[in-house]
Image (tube, grey):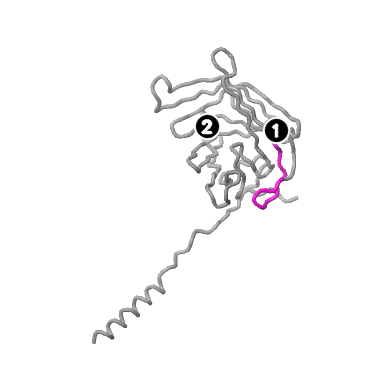
Amino acid sequence: MLRPILVSTLAVVALVAACAPSVESPRLEVQQLTEPVTFYPRQTGARWAYVADGAALDGIRYVETVEGPSVIDGDVWIAFRLVGGGQDVTHYRQFRDDGVYLRRQTRPGAIIDFDPPIREYPRQAELRVGLTWRADTVADQRYPTAAPGLRHVTLPVEYVYTVLDQRPVTVAGERYEVYVIDRTVRQFDEDGGVADELSRISWFAPYVGTVRHENGWFLVETNVRAPQP
């Protein structure tokens, strides 16, 4: 009598297993934007994924997403959030007739305001090889959780952008026409001397965005597509 019961029980188990939903590994899903992409992409939901130079395509990714409009001191700025590999940084930008401006950068435990805002890109019609633009600003840095004497620091900053080249590149199997841009930033001490200087290179593709990040990361996935000619 025990044998038939055992067989019946196994049959029920097999039937339940057959009806249970299968568990599959996550699959790549790319969602295209519904809004027309601009020369300097800023559409809410735009997304770019990067990996470090020489890293595997399925390695650590640094993902930047346009989160949308945000109000700072009564003005509307667009929030770009970058996460991955311990990074969690948000940049607040405005897209004006004369270019792209950076007003604020936030990260856990830090808020940095630039007064006046940094001009990251010129107007569309100006972008060309050989173009240089520069300006001075003040980096107002606040660290709410730091020791009392270190919670507020202001530093004068000079920045210089130079468009070094325009050329086709292939990254992760995709071909882009990019502008190679050098950004040099100098910080000054209280006596007016150069306390720090840093130069970095990025690649920008119109209607796509940053292809080579200044941190040495390369674009491997995006839902931003340049309009077809």
Q: Majority secondary structure of the magenta segment?
A: strand
Q: Which residue is mark 1?
A: 123
Outermost residue on the top side: it is: 191
Q: How far across and how far down the image is residue 190, in percent?
A: 54, 14
Within 10 angstroms of label 2, few (less than 14), some, or many (20 or more) residues?
some
Q: How far across and how far down the image is residue 1, in percent?
A: 23, 87
Between 45 and 8, the one nearer to me in the picture: 8
Question: Which residue is rendered at x = 55% and y = 16% of the image?
Answer: 189
Q: Which residue is mark 2?
A: 105
Q: How far across and how far down the image is residue 110, in percent?
A: 46, 30
Callout 2, which amino acid?
Gln
Q: How far across and how far down the image is residue 170, in percent?
A: 69, 48
Q: Secondary structure at mark 2?
A: strand
Does residue 176 belong to the magenta stretch? yes
Question: Which residue is rendered at x = 41% and y = 74% of the image?
Answer: 18
Quadrant of res 195: top right
